Amino acid sequence: MSVVVVTGTCTGVGKTVVTAALAAVTAARGASVAVVKPGQTGVRAGEPGDLDEVRRLAGLDDVHEFARFPDPLSPAAAARRAGVPAVRLPDVAKRVRDLSESRRLVLIEGAGGLLVRYDDEGATIADLARWLGAAVVVVARPDLGTLNHTALTLEAMAHRGVQLAGVVIGAWPDAPDLAMRSNLRDLETIAARPLAGALPAGAAALDPAEFLLAAHRGLAPSFGGAFDAAAFRDSYGPDPR
């Protein structure tokens, strides 16, 4: 039994797709997996949220959304604006521990980046990972600016004693530009380890069978996939600098 947290270097980096990919390859191996979203923001009651995308892509019904707020804000700000109680991450930790007793893997998808606030006291997904002893998958963009965002995220994790499970590029395009190709090596330098994966841009539009193949190709063996970081990097030629 294990718990893995999925966070991003910022919003819109592909956290949900990476979460679905991790769930898909785990389920394909016959292991039980649950996916948790502690706080869904920017979605009204009855509208599809991130877990609906996970369910569709990974073919997984064991999904758990603990709170939902209509405004596209941080969970803390969205709860304030809605006039309802904020997500209590200590309660989330207890519910995740309960889930982990009967699942091989529990995946937790955060909201936004690592230090987004869930309540007015400043609790973050980094705190939840630390309380659970969970390693964190950091989903990064491939383009200009990602090096600083990724370095800041990893530094914040190290400062809090949170373990890194790996850095995954959330959406790798068919025709990467110079900065993206150059960033491959630098992302590995920042993480002090090979990339843990790269999902193709547009993966969210695939059907479940195609998505499973993309997930297997795009995730490292440590996650049950076949991604070869060195071969991926070398396929784009030598460091363009």
Image (spheres, helix red, strand yellow):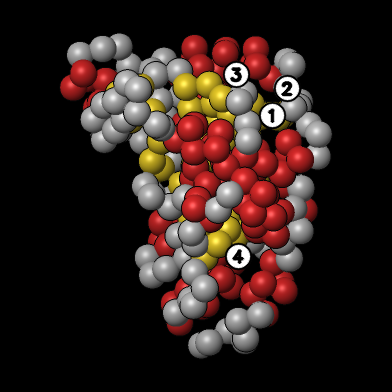
Contact between marks 4 and 1 (CB within 8 A): the answer is no
Residue closest to the eye, 154 or 60:
60
Question: Looking at the rendered structure, which numbered label has been put on residue 96?
Answer: 3
Q: Quadrant of residue 48?
A: top left
Write the residue at 63% across / 35% down.
59
Compare marks 3 and 1 and give the one earlier in the sequence: 1
Residue type of the residue flagged with mark 2:
Arg
Residue 99, horizontal then vertical, whole percent: 65, 16
Eye-nearest disc, 3 or 4: 3
Compare marks 4 and 2 and give the one earlier in the sequence: 2
Compare marks 3 and 2 and give the one earlier in the sequence: 3
Please tell me how crowded label 4 is: few (under 14), some (14-19), or many (20+) other residues with Cα within 10 Å.
some
Residue 57, horizontal then vertical, whole percent: 57, 42
Residue type of the residue flagged with mark 4:
Glu
Residue 190, horizontal then vertical, whole percent: 55, 62
Say which residue label 2 marks: 103
Contact between marks 4 and 2 (CB within 8 A): the answer is no
Is 43 rendered above or below residue 203?
Answer: above
Say which residue label 4 marks: 188
Compare marks 2 and 1 and give the one earlier in the sequence: 1
| CA distance separating discs 3 and 4 | 31 Å
Report helix, strand or loop for mark 3.
helix
Question: Looking at the rendered structure, which numbered label has been put on residue 33?
Answer: 1
| CA distance separating discs 4 and 1 | 28 Å
| CA distance separating discs 2 and 1 | 6 Å
Write the residue at 67% across / 63% down.
194
Please tell me how crowded label 1 is: few (under 14), some (14-19), or many (20+) other residues with Cα within 10 Å.
many
Is 111 rendered above or below residue 131?
Answer: below
Eye-nearest disc, 4 or 2: 2
Contact between marks 2 and 1 (CB within 8 A): the answer is yes
Report helix, strand or loop for mark 2.
loop
Please tell me how crowded label 2 is: few (under 14), some (14-19), or many (20+) other residues with Cα within 10 Å.
some
